[in-house]
Image: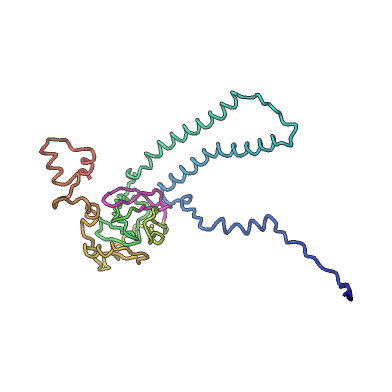
Amino acid sequence: MREQPADPRPVRRHPPSKLSPRHWLYAATPLVLTGCSWDLLNPSGSIGVQTRNLIVLATALMLLVVIPVIILTLVFAWRYRETNTKAEYAPRWSHSTKIEVVVWGIPCVIVAMLGIIIWDTTHKLDPFRPIESNVAPLEVDVVALDWKWLFIYPQYGVASLNELPIPVGTPINFRITAESTMNALFIPRLGSMVYAMAGMQTKLHLIADETGVFDGRSAAYSGSGFSDMHFRTIATSRGEFDAWIARAKASGNTLDESEYRKLEQPSSKDPVTVYARVEPRLFQGVVDQYMASNGEICRADSPVTLGAIAGANMPPLPAQQTILER
């Protein structure tokens, strides 16, 4: 068998490509930043600022324990590794008062500080607590529908679907309920999140300190249309807000019982719609829809309940007194 002559040309071998740490950082940055939102850390209202400060402070206090523990874990693992023959070997060691004081004392102090901070901020950031201001508040009734948001302005008799215009520097007093499925009203840059539940009414007080368009959303999963259940919060000057109210009143749309029944049907990605006239007790009717009995509404402030209390010579309950004064 005849041998083939060897190829005299040298074979070029390419070294394996190596990526520097900088290249890995560039490649990983888009993955790290995908889906990130810093709205909570970039607030535009006093409630949002207080919420941001609370999150940062609580995180920093907890890191005072977490970071030293992580560092000491790595230090001990390296110092007392099997190959380090110079490390001290103390098989009979069992107690150190100094270590006990540090291990238990520092966490106890931090937990006490967190308790005091949370107690104070829980009352200051109570969603039911009105915002102190020299400006008269704006009342907004919110109904969470499937899968859209209805905002009613009872002071003006207008309403808006999937859009919330508000004036800057004006406290917003929200009354919130839901038509059916539980949702959660959340405007991250203004702070706080409150659940909306059918047959119940809750409150929330927010304020915008600067103009802008802020994203609002539902923070509780409510079905197939949940991902599209967004709205825009448009904070404008008082003059621009008044102009929007004028445009809404000129729209010609009426939000009565029949129109509301259309809105309550599940749908997503509904366009922004404004209503010039709203049935006066529409919001209260949504809240009371599960409280009807024999043609009467079984509420703490209903005529039936008040008559029963008066007949029994009973003083109003605190909750009833609050409703009556409102």
Q: In the image as oriented, which residue stretches furthest toward the left? A: 311
Residue 133: image location, x then y, percent = 34, 46
Front residue of this view, candidates 246 and 230: 230
Q: Give the range drawn in magenta.
A: 183-210
Q: In the image as oriented, which residue stretches furthest toward the front? A: 1
Q: In which quarter of the image is residue 124?
A: top left
Front residue of this view, candidates 44 and 258: 258
Residue 303: image location, x then y, percent = 14, 46
Position above or below: 41 against 75: below
Number of marks: 0
Q: In which quarter of the image is residue 270?
A: bottom left
What residue sits 32% from the left and 46% below the top?
Answer: 134
Answer whether residue 184 is magenta in the image: yes
| Colouring scheme, one of rainbow, by chain, secondary structure, one colour | rainbow
Answer whether residue 273 is magenta in the image: no
Q: Quadrant of the C terminus?
A: top left
Q: In which quarter of the image is the N terminus?
A: bottom right
Position above or below: 4 against 316: below
What residue sits 50% from the left and 57% below the top?
Answer: 35
Position above or below: 218 against 106: below
What residue sits 26% from the left and 51% below the top?
Answer: 199
Q: In the image as oriented, which residue stretches furthest toward the bottom? A: 2
Residue 198: image location, x then y, percent = 28, 52
In the rendered structure, the answer to whether residue 258 lies left or right of residue 207 reads left
Front residue of this view, candidates 182 and 80: 80
Residue 51: image location, x then y, percent = 43, 45
In the rendered structure, the answer to whether residue 2 lies left or right of residue 291 reads right
